[in-house]
Image (cartoon, rainbow, N blue to C red):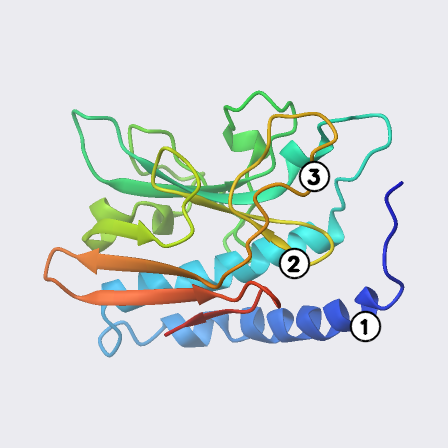
Amino acid sequence: MFTKSNNKSAFFLIELIFVILLLSLFSYIFIPKKIDSEFNSAIKRLILYLNQTKLQAFIDDKFSTSNTKWHKQRWTLKFLRCKESIGGIYYIIYSDKNMSGHAGSDDSLKDPLSKKNIFSSNDCQENSSNSEYVLLTKNFGIENIDMSCNDTDSLGQISFGSDGKVYTRLSNKENDSSSYLLEHDCFIEFKSKNNQIKKIKIYAKTGLIEEV
């Protein structure tokens, strides 16, 4: 029987306020383009998107007594490769509503300011509906990603539960909502074509996300 802690609301309320403050400063952070490199901007935006995903997971609790695979709908950020003829890396943020394993733009989270989908298909082409920040290679020169907590056969993903816990994969098994729980801090390393390196750390116990 699934139960929720009555104490988690206070903890997440603090996080909610923190994220709202971050989003309020969103425009200010990204205005000085000449000072901040495109590479740095891409990483900062990704951190904000990850925090937004965590917040969305808290607000949009996917637990269901009638759906034994409800956990497959958890809000997730997934890194993907563009199709071979194009090359490059991109990411999407989504909740797989139909649990098909193939998320579409309708499943994606929206950028809180631009209202664009945090999504792309594997053709990695810009359009007016999708956030340009998801195209890591094409728009920001990021050529490699290495996740210390990757439990997938691809570049990796991070999923968030409404209880604040972090997962490295979505189980396909019924009534299996606890597999792939992040037990050790996760580091995501980004390398640019100019050999710049940035790392994002996701703390296993708290779900805190920061650049290191």
Eye-nearest disc, 2 or 1: 1
Identify which residue, 169 or 124, lies in the foreground. Answer: 169
- Looking at numbered disc 2 in the image, what kind of residue is underneath it? Leu
Q: Is residue 143 left or right of residue 23?
A: left
Query: At 26% across and 74% down in the image, what residue appears?
Result: 36
Residue 73 vertical placement versus 193 (above, below): above
Q: Which label was assigned to residue 10?
A: 1
Q: Which element type, helix, strand or loop, lies under badge 2? A: helix
Q: Which element type, helix, strand or loop, lies under badge 3? A: loop
Query: At 57% across and 31% down in the image, what residue appears?
Result: 106
- Looking at numbered disc 3 in the image, what kind of residue is underneath it? Ser
Q: Is residue 179 left or right of residue 81?
A: right
Q: Is residue 172 left or right of residue 197?
A: right
Q: Quadrant of the N terminus?
A: top right
Identify which residue, 151 or 45, lies in the foreground. Answer: 151
Residue 138 vertical placement versus 35 (above, below): above
User: Which residue is under mark 3?
Assistant: 177
Question: In which quadrant of the rendered view does residue 21 lie?
Answer: bottom right
Percent x, y of residue 128: 40, 40
Percent x, y of residue 85: 16, 24
Q: Residues within 10 Å of mark 1 (few under 14, many from 20)?
A: few
Q: Which label was assigned to residue 175?
A: none
